[in-house]
Image (cartoon, grey):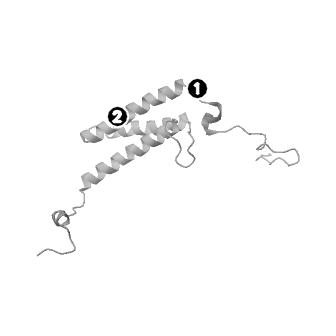
Amino acid sequence: MSDPARTPAEEDYEFTPPSPEEMHSALFGQLVMQQANMAALLLGHTPHPETGKTVRDLEAAKLFIDQLEMLEVKTKGNLSKEEDALLKQNLMALRLAFVEAVETPAPESESKGTEKLTPSAAPSQDEEPKKRFSRKF
């Protein structure tokens, strides 16, 4: 007899936990996508999730691309066809996007993620300037 609380579809489905290989493959894919998304964000291709503004930091984007290149070298011959294709496709797209970003000048307000001081943000003459760290010998 079947349990009246279960539907026929639930009776046919039994959860089997993923194998360690499947889990590692999923985690590898997630790592590649995370690195690629961060690089795309820093290349200005996707807006920042909290501010909605585009960020452009080519040095940081290159670091994420370099990390993916390192993964490609260190895992050569140890990836499945799908994992290898995911890594290669993301690297190709990011390299192309990086070259385009280098050749395209950044707008003034987006250079390295810094903004210009506006007159309201500049310190007034009445305020004492903040002391900077100094070292005396």
Q: Is residue 119 left or right of residue 62?
A: right
Image marks 1 and 2: residues in contact by CB distance under 8 Å: no
- Residue type indicated by callout 1: Pro
Residue wearing tag 1: 105
Quarter placement of the N terminus: bottom left
Residue for point 43% across, 28% down: 96
Q: Which residue lies furthest to the top in this view?
A: 103
Q: How crowded is mark 2: few (under 14 residues within 10 Å), some or many (20 or more)?
A: few
Q: Residues within 10 Å of mark 1 (few under 14, many from 20)?
A: few
The answer to which of 15 and 133 lies nearer the viewer is 15
Residue 109 in picture, x, y percent from top left: 65, 35
Residue 87 in picture, x, y percent from top left: 34, 38
Q: How many labels does the image show?
A: 2
Residue 91 in picture, x, y percent from top left: 39, 34
| CA distance for labels 1 and 2 | 26 Å
Q: What element carries label 2?
A: helix
Residue wearing tag 2: 89
**Residue 51 - label:** none
Q: Where, by quadrant of the figure, is residue 79 drawn? A: top left
Quarter placement of the C terminus: top right
Residue for point 21% across, 61% down: 16
Residue for point 53% across, 27% down: 102
